[in-house]
Amino acid sequence: MLGDPDGRTFSFMENAHQLLAPVANTLEGCVQLVEIALQEIAKRTRHFDALPNKPDNRDEYNARTKEKMPQLLVILDEFNGIVMATGGARGDFAQKTTQIAWRGAKFGVHLILAGQDFAKDIVGPVREQMSTRLCFQVSNASTSKIVLGKSGAEKIKHPGRALSNRWGMIQTYLVSKEDLIQRNPQTGMMAEEEALANHLKKESDGHLNLDILQDFLNVGERQARRLRADWLIRGLAEKRPHQNNGIYLAD
């Protein structure tokens, strides 16, 4: 679920099949998006309640049911501005967004908030519910303290560098809009990656065998291992304990 009141950030995703609701590109749309997310949490709560010995989390629920409950990302850009325009930190929108943060994780609903600036009274109620917080370069130490609880982001000089509450300073990487558009929206793969996946299905029943990877890509073992690790991180591959911990294409 994607919300941006300026209508620019997520325009290229408007027809993506992964969306639970249309991209919210107005202030009113962002408010409605939060309502839909809360309705989804309520629906998932009912599914949990329907099982004997109610599951503790989504992983346990999925282990006990045939119809799997997918993860849901609720991404709101310009969060600070939306809150300011909808009654402030004590307004209905801010309060309901905070509910998503503290109620959703158990049911696989995760909240991502982004913005150019965050005011202390606005970010305060929701900040401690956000397990991961990143602050890119900012103009003053106070903004860094509001987001992270410590200064330091005002000293960042390198593009893509960010200060985090969990790992200290980290480096992020740019994925261009053009790169995203070229990917298959159903698989997240580029054309050459899909060709490799189809080859693996044919030759090894989806097993990311190093010899097959090296032969198909004409690379050495190190590069083949890197690709395999990359696909694991991206969710394109998975380890299967029941198959000798082999790495296979994800279902």
Image: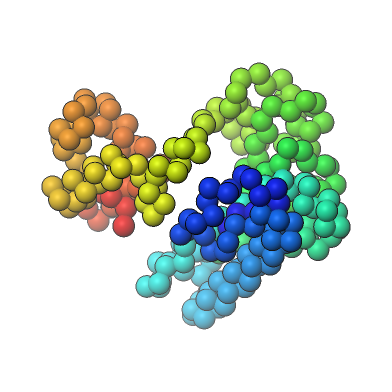
Viewer-proximal residue among 181 and 153: 181
Is 126 left or right of 189, judged from the image as shown? right
Residue for point 53% across, 74% down = 48
- Where in the figure is residue 3, as x and y percent of width and height? 65, 54
Residue for point 74% across, 61% down = 28
Residue 215 in sight in this render:
yes
Please tell me in which quadrant of the rendered image residue 217 appears. Answer: top left
Is residue 36 depicted above or below 111 in this figure? below
What quarter of the picture does the C terminus occupy? bottom left
Residue for point 60% across, 57% down = 23
Residue for point 49% across, 79% down = 51
Viewer-proximal residue among 103 and 12: 12
Residue 89 in sight in this render:
no
Please tell me in which quadrant of the rendered image residue 157 appears. Answer: top right
Total numbered labels: 0
Please tell me in which quadrant of the rendered image residue 106 appears. Answer: bottom right
- Where in the figure is residue 109, as x and y percent of width and height? 57, 60
Is 59 left or right of 74, judged from the image as shown? left
Q: How is the image coloured?
A: rainbow
- Where in the figure is residue 61, as x and y percent of width and height? 46, 68
Is 247 left or right of 234, judged from the image as shown? left
- Where in the figure is residue 166, as x and y percent of width and height? 61, 36
Is residue 154 depicted above or below 14 in this figure? above
What quarter of the picture does the N terminus occupy? bottom right
